[in-house]
Amino acid sequence: MAIVCLCQGVSERKVVRAIDAGATSIDEVTERCGAGNRCFGCHPAIEELIDTRVNVRPHGAAFA
Ligand code: FES
């Protein structure tokens, strides 16, 4: 299992779950799963996951 946020030990799966539950920004991902609230080194990875997941949502099709 890939760890996205080393500081908080948050896996990619947890970040994806937070995004699929409605998080659309890094702050919202942080609120939901804790990833990204320390060194911020994982922010690019979180951003990439948000882009990937939002584009697979039905309402995200407009941005594809
Ligand atoms: S790796 Fe996520 S806050 Fe440091």
Image (cartoon, grey):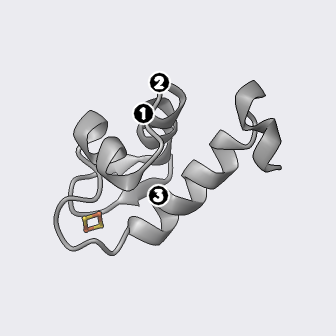
Asked which quadrant contains residue 3, the reply is bottom left
Q: Is residue 5 left or right of residue 49?
A: left
Determine crowd level at label 2: few under 14, some 14-19, many 20+ residues with C-alpha closer than 10 A: few
Amino acid residing under circle 2: Ala
The residue wearing badge 3 is: 46
State the CA–CA distance, disc 2 to disc 1.
5 Å
Helix, strand or loop status at disc 1: helix
Cα separation, mark 3 vs mark 2, equals: 14 Å
- Distance Cα–Cα, label 1 vs label 3: 11 Å
Label 3 residue near ligand 1, CB within 8 Å: yes
Q: Are marks 2 and 1 in contact (CB under 8 Å)?
A: yes
Q: Front-most of 14 and 63?
A: 63
Out of 14 and 3, give the one closest to the viewer: 14
Q: Quadrant of ligand 1?
A: bottom left
Q: List the single residue furthest toward the left.
A: 38
Q: Which residue is mark 2?
A: 21
| Kind of residue at disc 3 | Ile
Judge whether 44 appears above or below 19 on screen.
below
**As drawn, 48 above or below 34:** below
Q: Of the two numbered discs 1 and 3 on the same chain, state the one appearing first in sequence.
A: 1
Up/down of 56 relative to 51, above or below: above
Q: Amino acid at mark 1?
A: Ala
Circle 1 packing at 10 Å, graded few (<14), some (14-19), many (20+), is: many
Q: Which mark is residue 18?
A: 1
- Compare marks 3 and 2 and give the one earlier in the sequence: 2
Instruction: Point out residue 13 in the picture as x, y percentages from the top left corner.
Output: 49, 38
Q: Residue at x 21, y 73 (%)?
A: 39
Secondary element at image label 2:
loop
Residue 8: where, in percent of width, then height?
Answer: 21, 54
Helix, strand or loop under label 3: helix
Residue drawn 28% across the image and 59% down it: 36
